[in-house]
Structure formats: structure tokens, C-alpha cells
């Protein structure tokens, strides 16, 4: 049996595409380059998702804070500053190209600092800050989609503003916008493909390196395509399962 | 009379504006411990707003409110602690759809445990058990023991409202506020909810109830307030208000709804 497959494999390698495949992935153990690129892309995505989600929640919080007539002046100023900061942040992020933001972080903001951050970490910050803006818009829409009576019920039971948000409103908000969040996460993963501009050794970088050795982009970029597809498929399956779970409570 | 003569709610000079809209135009009212007060009046007269001011879901524009001797309208008032003394039941139930019936009832008592001194010495586990036991007792009281593990979407309207009442009672409030608790219910479910409220009234709970159920108000309330256009136009014993109202506006309202 194994001999049968072995023959099939040898025959494949003797065809034209087989040879290209061999050059792109097998010779000099180049598959290792791809796998380490994939691992970098996964780490970068995970970092960006984490930062983006945290920043998004924080910005949502800033933009939804409101004062009332009992709020004392210093707090009022703080809240107003938070609102304005959130507004400016959203404006800048949405108004500039991502690739420019990434380079800005690497060359202009972090570059001159007397610290030595890996490009991977810088990219993680850049993508996180970027997607934080889009995620905060999604979270905000989700929160506004939850019936006001939910928060009122929570508050009327004596829960604090924070607890009500965290235990009552947010779970329902997230559930309402879960497909949109999944979508944003997927966009984010795909966008990490431009991290190569600051030298992050990700999937794209691996494909480029191999291409520059063998002067044939077909196999390297097909390989990159498959790798991105696998990562994203994995994420969407997780989200499908999550959605199904959350939806269980509203079946009669 | 089931109530003592100590005031538990004292409202004076209460005004509420929504922007330029003047909704409450100077409300003065005192509710005694154990009293059952029914608030009636035409739509838009400010009944809900009045009720919601009592637990600061709406912040009064002007005036003072004392609950159980504490002025809740002071800027420094501890809003969350004050609200724990008052349960509120809403027209649309507002159960938490992502939590089971049991969790709906136990969540707040559990989360606010540290702020309640009576239980300070209990361990976490012991405390959780105690809350669960009490929740089951409350479910028994509203006749829904078998629904402990259901989710709100699996309940009928009447069942939802009974869970909502149990949830409010789990905080061991001194006052219960009801805002048209049966208005969103089909007729055949109204009775089961009113029965629960009647039981509660019999136990001496202080209740303020906005309602269109005139029979229930007549039956259970000690006092009826008639509101119109942001004023309490008339107040008195149910027999008097329903059979012999003094004000013309009360009379014309009642002639439409009775
Ligand atoms: N959050 C709000 N913002 C602006 N206006 C409001 C708000 N809440 C209530 N109002 C207005 O205040 C007035 C009184 O409303 P309220 O809900 O207190 O009346 P109600 O007596 O409870 O009426 P109903 O019997 O229909 O429930 C209405 O004109 C309403 O439109
Ligand atoms: Mg109302």
C-alpha cells in the first residue's frame, strides 16, 4: 500500500507541475519556511485579534460614557475628553490606509524609540489599533441593539453600571453582532498579509523568498493561498459553533 | 390596615423634564410602610416617569425623594444601594434572555453579595447555596419550580412576569414598584400574575403600582392616585375614587375606563 503511494508520489514529481512543486516546497526544506511563515501569521493574527478586541471594547466604553446632572466637574471633563478622544481615534483610523498606518508605527512611532521591538510585535500593535476602531463600531452597534429594558432591569436590581454592562448587555450585544465580528476578524487576518512591508517573516514573506529563488511565483503563491484559506476556515468554523451555542437559548 | 404609620417614600416638589417637555409638574406624595398605592391616569400623564424617578431610572430635574429615610436625590447618594431596597417589575418583563430562570433570579443577589453586611461572614460556597435555596423558594411561591432550568424564551408571558417578580424579590426589597405588569399579557395570563401580587400584598409588602386593572386596584390598593398631565389630580381610598371622585378630570377618565 505505502509502496503504491510512494510510486504515485514519484510519478507526480516527474511531471512538470510536480517538479515545480518540488522546487517550491521540498528542495532545501523550503516547506519549513512556509510553515514558520504560517506560524508567524497565526501569531500575528492572534495578537491583532486580542489587541483589537481589547482596544475596541475600551473605545466603545469611552464613546458610550455619558454624564448626568449629578456628575461632578472633574469626572464630566474626563468623560468629555474620552468621548472626544474616541472620536478622533475612529476618524484617523478610518481615514487613512492601513499600509500607511503599519509603516507609520514601524518607522515613525516605534522606530526612533530607544527600544528594540520585533517587527512582528509592531505589526501586532498596528493591526490591533486599526481593527480596534472597526470592532468598536461593531460593539457599539451591538450594545445599541440590546433593548434598553435589559440595562434598566439590571440597574433596578442594584447591579452597578459596569456589572450590568458586563453581565447583561454585552453578552447579548456580542451575540447579536457575532457574524459581523467574525467577518471583521477574517478581514483582519487577511490584512495581516501586508505585514511584509516592515519585514515580518509571515506567509507572504515566505512565498516571496521562495519566488526569488526559483523565479516562478505560481507554486509559492498557491501555497500561500492555501495556508490563508486554512487559517480562515478554521476561524469561521469556530465562530459557526459559537453562534449555534449562543442561539440555543432562544429556541422554544 | 396592614401598614404602620412610618413613611417609607416621601416625595416633594418632584419635577421632571425631558428636554423641554415638562412631564412631572410638582409631585408631592408620601407612602407609608406596607401601603399599597395604585397609580392610574391617562396615557402620557407621567405615571411611568413618576415610578421610574422613585428608583432613579429617571433622574428628577427638581425636588427631593426620601426612601426609607435616605435622600436619594442628593448627588452623593449611593444609587446602587438604594435600588437594592426596591424591586421593579416592568411591563415587558425584561428578563435576561441569555440566562436560565434560576440565573435570572440569583445573578444579582450573588453579584452584590459583598455589599450586603448581613452575609459578610458567610463563605462563598455557603452563600451561593443560600441564594439558590431562596431562589427555589421564590419560584415555589410564584408556582414555577419546574421552570428553574428553562430559558425565558421557553416561558409564556404570564410565567415570564412571575419570574420577573421572583427576581425582584430575591433582592429582599422593602418596596416593590410595578409598571403596568399585566398590560402586555393575554387575558388568561393576567390572573396568575395578579394572584402572585395579591399574595405579596397580603404579606405586608409596600407596593406602588401603575395599572389599568381597575378591579385589582380597587381590590388590593389602600390608596389610589389619579395622575393627569404631570400632576396628581386626586388621591384617596379606592372606594372614594372609584365611586365618588371629586375632580371632574377623574370622573371623565373613569367613565372611559370603567
Ligand atoms: N425618555 C424619554 N424621553 C423623552 N420623553 C419621554 C421619555 N419618557 C417619557 N417621555 C414622555 O413623557 C410623557 C409621560 O410619559 P410616561 O411614560 O410617564 O407616561 P405614562 O403615564 O406612563 O403613559 P402610559 O400609560 O402610556 O404608559 C410622555 O409624553 C412621553 O412621551
Ligand atoms: Mg407608562
Image: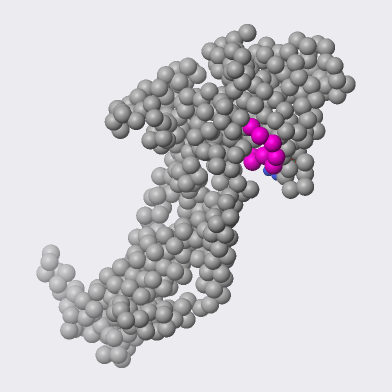
* Colouring scheme applied when the structure was drawn: one colour
The residue positioned 47% from the left and 24% from the top of the image is B172
Image quadrant assignment for residue A236: bottom left
Q: Nearer the viewer, residue B146 or A12?
A: B146
- Where is residue A212? Give x, y as percent: 30, 90
Q: Is residue B153 visible?
A: no
The residue positioned 15% from the left and 74% from the top of the image is A7
Q: Which residues are magenta?
A: B57-65
Residue B189 colored in magenta in the image: no
Residue B61 colored in magenta in the image: yes
Image quadrant assignment for residue A44: bottom left
Q: Give the side of residue B133 with respect to residue A7, left or right.
A: right
- Where is residue A188? Give x, y as percent: 43, 68
Residue lying farthest right? B248
- Where is residue B68? Give x, y as percent: 56, 26
The residue positioned 21% from the left and 81% from the top of the image is A30
- Where is residue A68? Give x, y as percent: 61, 49
Quadrant where the N terminus of chain A sits is bottom left
Amino acid at each position: 500500500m505505502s509502496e503504491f503511494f510512494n510510486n504515485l508520489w514519484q510519478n507526480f514529481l516527474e511531471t512538470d507541475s510536480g517538479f515545480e512543486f518540488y522546487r517550491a516546497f521540498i528542495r532545501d526544506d523550503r516547506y519549513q519556511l512556509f510553515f514558520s511563515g504560517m506560524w508567524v501569521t497565526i501569531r500575528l493574527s492572534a495578537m491583532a485579534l486580542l489587541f483589537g478586541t481589547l482596544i475596541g471594547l475600551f473605545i466603545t466604553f469611552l464613546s458610550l460614557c455619558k454624564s448626568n446632572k449629578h456628575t461632578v466637574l472633574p469626572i464630566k471633563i474626563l468623560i468629555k475628553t474620552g468621548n472626544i478622544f474616541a472620536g478622533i481615534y475612529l476618524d484617523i483610523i478610518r481615514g487613512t490606509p492601513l499600509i500607511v498606518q503599519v509603516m507609520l508605527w514601524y518607522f515613525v512611532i516605534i522606530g526612533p524609540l530607544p527600544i528594540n521591538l520585533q517587527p512582528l510585535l509592531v505589526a501586532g500593535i498596528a493591526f490591533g489599533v486599526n481593527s480596534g476602531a472597526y470592532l468598536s463600531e461593531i460593539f457599539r452597534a451591538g450594545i445599541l441593539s440590546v433593548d434598553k429594558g435589559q440595562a434598566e432591569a439590571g440597574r433596578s436590581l442594584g447591579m452597578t453600571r459596569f456589572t450590568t454592562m458586563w453581565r447583561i448587555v454585552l453578552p447579548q450585544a456580542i451575540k447579536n453582532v457575532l457574524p459581523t465580528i467574525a467577518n471583521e476578524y477574517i478581514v483582519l487576518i487577511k490584512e495581516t498579509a501586508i505585514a511584509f512591508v516592515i519585514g515580518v517573516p509571515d506567509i507572504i514573506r515566505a512565498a516571496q523568498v521562495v519566488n526569488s529563488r526559483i523565479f516562478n511565483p505560481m507554486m509559492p503563491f498557491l501555497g500561500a493561498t492555501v495556508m490563508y484559506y486554512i487559517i480562515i476556515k478554521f476561524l469561521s468554523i469556530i465562530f459557526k459553533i459559537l453562534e449555534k451555542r449562543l442561539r440555543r437559548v432562544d429556541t422554544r | 390596615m396592614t401598614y404602620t404609620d412610618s413613611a417609607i417614600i416621601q416625595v416633594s416638589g418632584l419635577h421632571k423634564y425631558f428636554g423641554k417637555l415638562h412631564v412631572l409638574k410638582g409631585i408631592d406624595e408620601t407612602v407609608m410602610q406596607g401601603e399599597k398605592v395604585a397609580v392610574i391616569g391617562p396615557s402620557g400623564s407621567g405615571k411611568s416617569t413618576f415610578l421610574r424617578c422613585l428608583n432613579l431610572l429617571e433622574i428628577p430635574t427638581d425636588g427631593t425623594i426620601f426612601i426609607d429615610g435616605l435622600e436619594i436625590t442628593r448627588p452623593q447618594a449611593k444609587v446602587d444601594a438604594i435600588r437594592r431596597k426596591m424591586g421593579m417589575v416592568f411591563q415587558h418583563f425584561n428578563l435576561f434572555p441569555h440566562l436560565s430562570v434560576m440565573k435570572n433570579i440569583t445573578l444579582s443577589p450573588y453579584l452584590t453579595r459583598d455589599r450586603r453586611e448581613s452575609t459578610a461572614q458567610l463563605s462563598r460556597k455557603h452563600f451561593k447555596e443560600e441564594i439558590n435555596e431562596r431562589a427555589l423558594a421564590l419560584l415555589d411561591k410564584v408556582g414555577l419550580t419546574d421552570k428553574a432550568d428553562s430559558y425565558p424564551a421557553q416561558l409564556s408571558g404570564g410565567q415570564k412576569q412571575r419570574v420577573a417578580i421572583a427576581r425582584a424579590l430575591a433582592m429582599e426589597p422593602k418596596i416593590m414598584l410595578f409598571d403596568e405588569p399585566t398590560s402586555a399579557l393575554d387575558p388568561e395570563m393576567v390572573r396568575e400574575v395578579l394572584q402572585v401580587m395579591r399574595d405579596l400584598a397580603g404579606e405586608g409588602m409596600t407596593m406602588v403600582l401603575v395599572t389599568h386593572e381597575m378591579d385589582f386596584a380597587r381590590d388590593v390598593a389602600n390608596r389610589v392616585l389619579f395622575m393627569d398631565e404631570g400632576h396628581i389630580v386626586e388621591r384617596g381610598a379606592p372606594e372614594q375614587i372609584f365611586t365618588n371622585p371629586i375632580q371632574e378630570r377623574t370622573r371623565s377618565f373613569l367613565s372611559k375606563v370603567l
